[in-house]
Amino acid sequence: MTHHVETHEEAANDRVMFGFWVYLMTDLLMFAILFAVYAVLHGNTMGGPAGRDLFKPELALAETLILLTSSFTAGIGMIAARRGIKRQVLVWFGITFLLGLAFLGIELFEFAEFIHEGHTMTVNAFLSSFFVLVGTHGLHITSGLLWLAILLAFITKRGLTKANVRKLALLSLFWHFLDIVWIFIFTVVYLRAFV
């Protein structure tokens, strides 16, 4: 009887994991479309500023290093979760959360600076595609941070249950996915502006 219950639980976990992969693939498709739109429109500045006139490479590099580090801390947190070490999970994922907040803070600062200088998404096609692509990634980071905050609260209260470890694994997968998307943004949007 116990074996049957475990098999049923494993099947449910497999369905959840499969469903999450399907979600990630649809998200990947959406980002691919946004990258394609940016690739087509990035040169359409209508006489306005181009990326090289606006972007600060040091900010983009800082964001990249912060996000890569947060992926590393999430990975260490997952090792601790699989070993059942609650305190380490809270510490490493807490650091991941703070790094995510720092990343988001830099992105919002950059957006606010552009808007303050009059470089809004309505100025030209380049800025429209930039704000939509980078902003969509920022919204994903925001939802990942909310998810992480709620999950850390659950783990603090209920411990490292099987369900919480599974949710952490899904969150970790999502976070690594966002890291990969950012590397493409850093390359296609920021580095390409200066090449």
Image: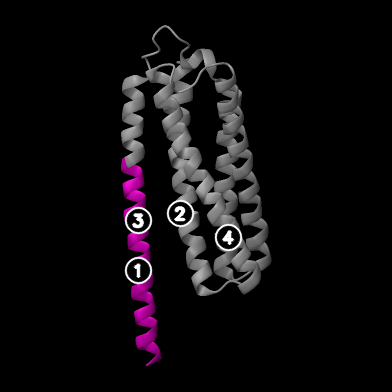
**Of marks 4 and 3, which one's residue comes earlier in the chain?**
3
Residue 21 magenta: yes
The three-letter code of the residue at mark 3 reads: Trp
The three-letter code of the residue at mark 4 reads: Ile
Screen quadrant of the C terminus = top left
From the viewer's perspective, tell me whether residue 102 is left or right of residue 22: right
The three-letter code of the residue at mark 2 reads: Leu
Residue that badge 2 annotates: 173
The three-letter code of the residue at mark 1 reads: Asp
Secondary structure state at the residue bearing disc 1: helix
On the image, the x and y values in percent for residue 78 come to 55, 60
Which mark's residue is nearer the viewer, 4 or 3? 4
Label of residue 150 in the image: 4
Q: What is the spatial separation of the Cα atoms under label 4 and label 1, in whole angstroms?
A: 23 Å
Residue that badge 1 annotates: 14
From the viewer's perspective, tell me whether residue 120 is left or right of residue 83: left
In this rendering, the answer to whether 68 lies above or below 169 is above
**Of marks 4 and 2, which one's residue comes earlier in the chain?**
4
Which mark's residue is nearer the viewer, 4 or 2? 4
Give the residue at x 66% y 62%. Answer: 88
Q: What is the spatial separation of the Cα atoms under label 3 and label 1, in whole angstroms?
A: 11 Å
The stretch of residues the image draws in magenta is: 1-29
Front-lying residue, 159 or 131: 131
Label of residue 104 in the image: none
Q: Residues within 10 Å of mark 3 (few under 14, many from 20)?
A: some
State if disc 1 and disc 4 touch (CB < 8 Å): no
Label of residue 21 in the image: 3
Secondary structure state at the residue bearing disc 4: helix
On the image, the x and y values in percent for residue 84 come to 60, 71
Q: Residues within 10 Å of mark 1 (few under 14, many from 20)?
A: few
